[in-house]
Image (tube, rainbow, N blue to C red):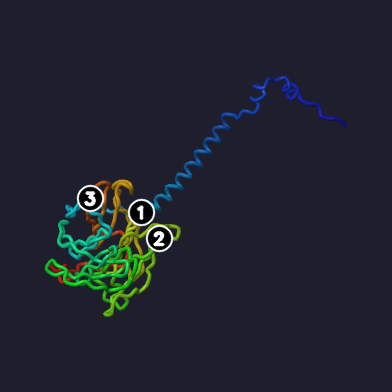
Amino acid sequence: GGEPVAGVRSFLFQFETTYEKSAHFRPSADYLFKVAMALVTLFWILALIWSFWFSINVFNKITLTGERVDWQMPQPWRMVKSFGCELQGTHFTVTDGYTVQVLNSDGSLFLHFEACGDGPVLAVDFGQGGEVIACCEKGTQSTWIENGKVVRQQWVSNFTMLTDIAVDRTPLETDDHIDALAIRNNQLLGIVFDPTGWRIFGALTLPQNKDRTEEITALAIRLGRALILTNSDEVFEMDVPSGMWAGPMLLPTLGSKVAYDWISVCRLSGARWRFVGQPSASPIQLWAFSRPPVNNLPPRKDDFTNQQLTLAA
């Protein structure tokens, strides 16, 4: 029996100082090198994973390129909440939430009038016959113009709380086509025009995933092709008959969201897009973009020109 005899090393260890004892537990240079290389390798693996995610979520987003149009509103101080254009871009309609203006192509005033009675004007666009459509709290109202004057106003629906509207002035000739799109509670509503009035045809799908909360702020539609603008300055395009979405496409970064705000969008003929934006402490601006050939949506021929649909001057 008995206990094993301690070795010489253990015997001498009890006489060593604290510093000398700690030397026995210091990692070697080879060990430290291996740990450092493992950390560097882990860092590069995480960097590759992040770059792969970044390429999927950012690099595949097309940044639209355009140019600012020489365009100025008659009152540079006036705000724009909603914006619409006729097919050839000879006239635009805007509202600041209280009155409606029809502007010439250079932004000069064509006509100023009131709509929605005593209530606020939530959104505007041109109708299929050249009239101006205004969304009000209690419904939608059309204003007919001839020779630079308002000749008739009438209520065309009782749809309430539509925060934006876009009328397809060249709708597809199909039985289930949509004449207009509208936004209500961050939903896209398809609207058809019947002889007896407007009716909601249904709600459209959205392009965002369920975990994304971008708010739809503006929209446009032409030949069954819809554009939506979100509050994160992303643009999506939808081919309504097929239900297919493309995007997001990014508007140019002209500063932070606080410094520059893209407000609204409209579609002209010939695959031309127009956006209005507001830089901080400056008047409203108009920008021109062309549709980029970046997606595989079903083709739509866009060479339609019908002068009868332009605003009666």
Which of the 4 quarters of the picture holds residue 295?
A: bottom left
Q: Pick the residue in front: 262 or 246.
A: 262
Where's residue 187, x and y in %?
A: 38, 65
Q: Please name the residue shown 22% across and 50% down the image.
A: 283
In primary-sequence order, the first of circles 3 and 1 is 1
Residue 256 to residue 91: above or below: above
The numbered mark at residue 232 is: 1
Instruction: Kindly report the distance in space between the C-alpha atoms of the residues bearing marks 1 and 2.
Output: 12 Å
Instruction: Check the image and name the residue furthest to the front.
Output: 118
Sequence-first disc among 2 and 3: 2
Instruction: State how many labels appear.
Output: 3
Label 3 secondary element: loop
Q: Position of residue 130 (x, y in %)?
A: 19, 69
Q: Which mark is residue 264?
A: none
Q: Is residue 138 left or right of residue 290?
A: right
Of marks 1 and 2, which one's residue comes earlier in the chain? Answer: 2
Amino acid type at mark 3:
Pro
Q: Label 3, on which residue? A: 283
Q: Nearer the viewer, residue 200 or 74?
A: 74
The type of residue carrying mark 2 is Gln
* Along the line of sight, the residue nearer the viewer: 293 or 212: 212
Q: Residue type at mark 1?
A: Ser
Q: Position of residue 7 (x, y in %)?
A: 76, 25
- Quarter that holds the N terminus: top right
Distance in Å between CA atoms under marks 2 and 3: 31 Å
Packing grade of label 2 (10 A; few <14, some 14-19, many >=20) is: some
In what quadrant of the picture does the C terminus appear?
A: bottom left
Q: Which mark is residue 208?
A: 2
Viewer-side label of 2, 3: 3
Image quadrant of residue 135? bottom left
